[in-house]
Image (tube, rainbow, N blue to C red):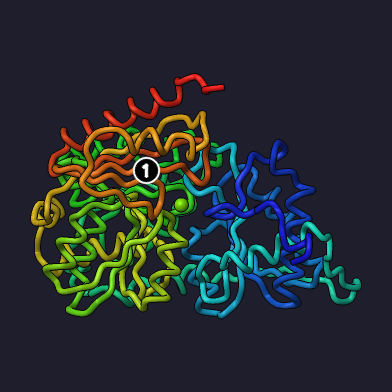
Amino acid sequence: MTDNSKHEPIFGTNGIRGIPNKDLSVEFAQEIGKAIGTFYGKVQVAMGRDTRDTGNMIFNAVTSGMMSAGSSVIDLGILPTPAVQYYCKTKGIFGVVITASHNPPQFNGIKCIANDGTELRREDEEKIERIYYQKSYNTVSWEESGSIKSDPTSLDLYLDGIMSHVDVKKVRDSQFRVLVDSGNGASYFTTPSLLRRLGCKVVSLNTYPDGKFTSRTSEPKPENLKDLITLMKSGTFNLGIAHDGDADRAVFIDENGNFIDGDKTLTLVVKSVIKPGSRVVTPISSSDAIDEVCSSGKAELIRTRVGAPIVSRAMIDNNAMIGGEENGGIIFGEHQYCRDGAMTAALILDLMATNGKKISELISGLPQYHIHKLSVERKKDWRILEPGILSYGETSKIEKTDGLKIYLKDGWVLMRASGTEPIIRIYGQARDEKRAKELAQEYEALILGLQEVPKAE
Ligand code: MG
């Protein structure tokens, strides 16, 4: 093994993230662009971005680097990440998305898409990193430098693709009244357009691009969706939809203004699409409701480590039809092997239309489990904390697929160090909300206590 094969990773679990002009400089973005272009080669590359203020700056830096290596860019403009992925999949070309997903507005990021629409495999990201560290860029002659063009067909391509998987007539006939909150993100025109094409009466909230996300924080959590929830309580709408900044996730509010946990949405979609022998993929962080639904539907459930690209890859490797996470990220294999917020919204409307039921009725028919999530600042290395956690309390089973999952007689607790932030995520799961919260808080206190213990010298 040469020295060049070992290097610090640049791509995290969801691409490169940072604060432009702070830890994500335009010089770095341009060099990464050169490395990406060297790896992709003299081919056409689809590029999209979310609505962040620094989107154009980072886009132009990455693009100029790529073109200097001979790649030609198809600029798809502001578009949800899954719409760019669908374009890549359909055209069989590589892609790059400039986005920091649900992160605060000061962040931005660079995410590479493979020519099948999935996130680029880790080994290919490593090749790009190696080119970057070795500075072995393919700088082409001026005649061979890449060009840039746009393609206005990307919206229709994406929306037609989604609509091909739902019973459009039934949804149209239902004439749903839908309230959609894009949080000033990349779905500001895609999801309202989709809903109108599905015959819904659409009222939109925060559906204008604003790179500072002034209307609400980008992460679609209940505490960030107060306006949407309040408006849903009016009883005027059949469904409320909210996306994160790049719209690969969708969360829902029922017709009474109740926030529907992403785990329940996932369970509902899994239950509705599986057939005997189907395979389903979800990380260890989603609830036991998925196990129950898969077992009664005679489907096989595969559990993975946490992270959407890991779930996507496991779905492809196992030929699974449906997968996803408890945070509102659902992957519908027939459409594409990545999380897609608009596809998820269409599936939910399709379920409401074909079953003739309200969303609250569909949700109440599921096995009842609750997940309470907390996070604490990580002050110590995870390996130092693990023995202290393991020696605490009585456990019936311990799983180490990702962090520590401790099974108790009435639920479980999952604790893991985040791959993107210096925090420890804690998930408590139980049959009722109160117990799930108690479990998460008990282990939060334990971890806080363990981090306070002075180091033994
Ligand atoms: Mg996202």
**Residue 124 drawn at (x, y percent):** 63, 68
Vertical side of 77 occupied by 395: above or below: above
Quarter of the image for residue 47 reads bottom right
**Residue 49 drawn at (x, y percent):** 58, 55
One can see residue 268 in this view: yes
Q: Is residue 232 left or right of residue 387?
A: left
**Residue at 12% from the left image edge and 56% from the top image edge:** 366
The local crowd at label 1, few if under 14, some if 14 to 19, many if 20 or more residues have their Cα within 10 Å, is many
**Residue at 33% from the left image edge and 74% from the top image edge:** 320
One can see residue 195 in this view: no
Q: Is residue 116 left or right of residue 308?
A: right
**Residue 433 drawn at (x, y percent):** 17, 37
- Ligand 1 lies under 8 Å from the Cβ of mark 1: no
**Residue at 41% from the left image edge and 61% from the top image edge:** 339
User: Residue tagged by mark 1?
Assistant: 220
Numbered disc total: 1
Q: Quadrant of the C terminus?
A: top right
Vertical side of 86 occupied by 191: above or below: above
* Amino acid tagged 1: Pro
**Residue 227 drawn at (x, y percent):** 31, 34
Name the foreground residue: 345 vs 387: 387
**Residue at 52% from the left image edge and 76% from the top image edge:** 116
Quarter of the image for residue 205 reads top left
Q: Is residue 301 left or right of residue 249?
A: left
Element type at mark 1: loop
Q: Quadrant of the N terminus?
A: bottom right
